[in-house]
Image: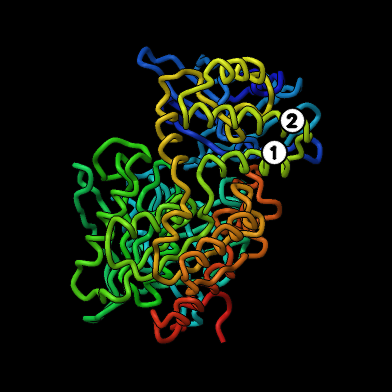
Amino acid sequence: MFSAFAGALFTCLFAIASTPPAGVDGSWAGVVQRGTDSLYLVVTLSHDAKGNQLASIAFPKEGESKYPASASTADGTTTITAVKDGTTLSMAGALSGERIQGGYRFGASQGTLDLWPLRKMGRRDLLPFTGDFSDEHGHDVVVGESLGALYFFDRLTGRTGRLYPLANGAFFGGPSLLIYVPVAVTAQFSSSANDLTFAVDGATTMLHRVTAGSRTDVTFDALGAQIAGTLRRPAGVGPFPAVLILAGSNGQPRSGFYALEDFVSDQFARLGFVVLTFDKRGVGDSGGPAGDNGVEQVAAAAFRFLKQQPGVDAARVGIWGLSQGGIIAPKVATLENGVRFIVNESGSIVDANTEEVERTANMMRVDGFDERDIADAVAFQRLKFHYARTGLGWSEYAAGYKKYAERSWFPDPYVGPPASKSSSAWKFWRESGSIEPAEFWRRFPGSVLLLFAQLDTIGDPNENIALFVKTMAAAGNKNYTIGIVPGADHSMYVARTGSWREDRLLTKLSFPAFNLLNAWLQSQQLIETIPESARLGARN
């Protein structure tokens, strides 16, 4: 709703001259100045079935929400109108090549308008551009795909971000993960997609595709559905160590959100592992209903499929999991024999409901909420999870819902409570909160690398570590290593505070997280040496 903009009205006048309306349909990213402040915006233009011009505005720095604006077309000119913070913004431009260029006025400020197209492509069309690229000095860039978009990971600098398609194998990216302009990254692929001219902040590198081993699309069955995935295999005949990659919660594809699991899989492949990733049910090419219910059973089927692959050393097969993936990993080990090791990054040891309460408090505190607001939000979360676990206390929950509904912390990402008893969220919270992951860690006899991020706001690293140590002591399992990754957020991006508000401003993945993984795998004799190609940063 427009009211979510704290009552601020937004006005934008956007004119496109001498261009057929359909020619500008789509999303466009730009940046305008108001005094010394930059306003990043995305304009989306479309037409309904009757040919009426439609428009919306979004502000990437402030969130993914789109706000409606009025649109009209007259004499070949399309206009969009509204008001932001009481100040009129007017933009006028013409389609020039692939961009819309012209000028803007924002209150007393004015300047040159340059809007870039935000297009998406299908996975099949993007796959030819994915892979590993390197130059003669060992500067490696990995390109992955996630949900119809390309992402890159520069293994020399740690820089990562999204790449938007232009024509003829050209792509561009902005200054951070989800800020699209001003353009800071360009990628030009050759016609064969085997050569890449890659430029970041004006520094250009000529890269060439490097192929070591193979990547094959595979399928397996789980819970009555066909699950699609990708199997990476090193060159040679083996036997090789192998690892199953488990992404975090929600509808994640085999590559993970922002291709993060693609980059982790690439790291394992460089270390000589057979690697399996898969689309969650109802996502990508996988069948079945979407949602996280039954995710452990799907993961167990994936592990069984992996360990049956030719050339896999059955004594060196394990699981790497991030967040939810790390939480369910020990449970998967109880469902399927042969899990030799687990790498758990940011996966809670306490039960999911306790973690959610801690997440609410941590995120609100980092974002500057008053302690009284935090106490109210935590109390309401406890009402929510009490009802989820027991089915009791609906009247108290409903009263809290009514009392707090207008509070700024009430929606996602802080609480986001369901309004009715029929919500499927209740079943998920009841099942996920009924069992503490520590119960399954007590039953896991293999080796463990447990990594938490210093700036994790999803859970409390200290509480999780203390419970893990207590649990492993009770089980008599001393074969574990615990690490805290400095300056990293929950997903191991380099961060300043760990706040969700930083997500779209992130620019780098944490090298220490990769380095701790490398060293631990070698210490466990899962690999003999760390190949030069698996090292990050500048090479000697």
408 vs 67, left or right, is right
Q: Where does the image place residue 414, in percent across and percent down from the top left?
A: 62, 34
Q: Name the residue at 47% across, 70% down.
A: 476
Task: Tell me: residue 86, above or below residue 518.
Answer: above
Question: Residue 4: percent from the left, percent from the top?
Answer: 64, 22
Q: Amino acid at mark 1?
A: Met
Q: Note whether residue 119 is visible.
A: no
Where, by quadrant of the figure, is residue 94 drawn?
Answer: top right
Q: Amino acid at mark 2?
A: Asp
Crowd around label 1: few <14 · some 14–19 · many ≥20 (10 Å): many
Instruction: Check whether the beta carbons of the residues at disc 2 and disc 1 lie within 8 A of each other.
Output: yes
Q: What residue did someone put label 2 on? A: 373
Q: Nearer the viewer, residue 20 or 80?
A: 80
How has the structure been colored for display? rainbow
Which type of secondary structure does the marked residue at label 2 adopt? helix
Horizontally, residue 489 falls left or right of residue 439, namely: right
Residue underneath mark 1: 364
Q: Dot 1 lies on which element?
A: helix
Q: Determine whether, in the image, residue 30 is placed left or right of residue 50.
A: right
Alpha-carbon distance for marks 2 and 1? 9 Å
Q: Quadrant of residue 356?
A: top right
Q: Residue at x 57, y 59 (%)?
A: 492
* Residue 141 visible in the displayed image: yes
What is the x, y in percent for residue 434?
44, 40
As displayed, is residue 27 above or below residue 454?
Answer: above
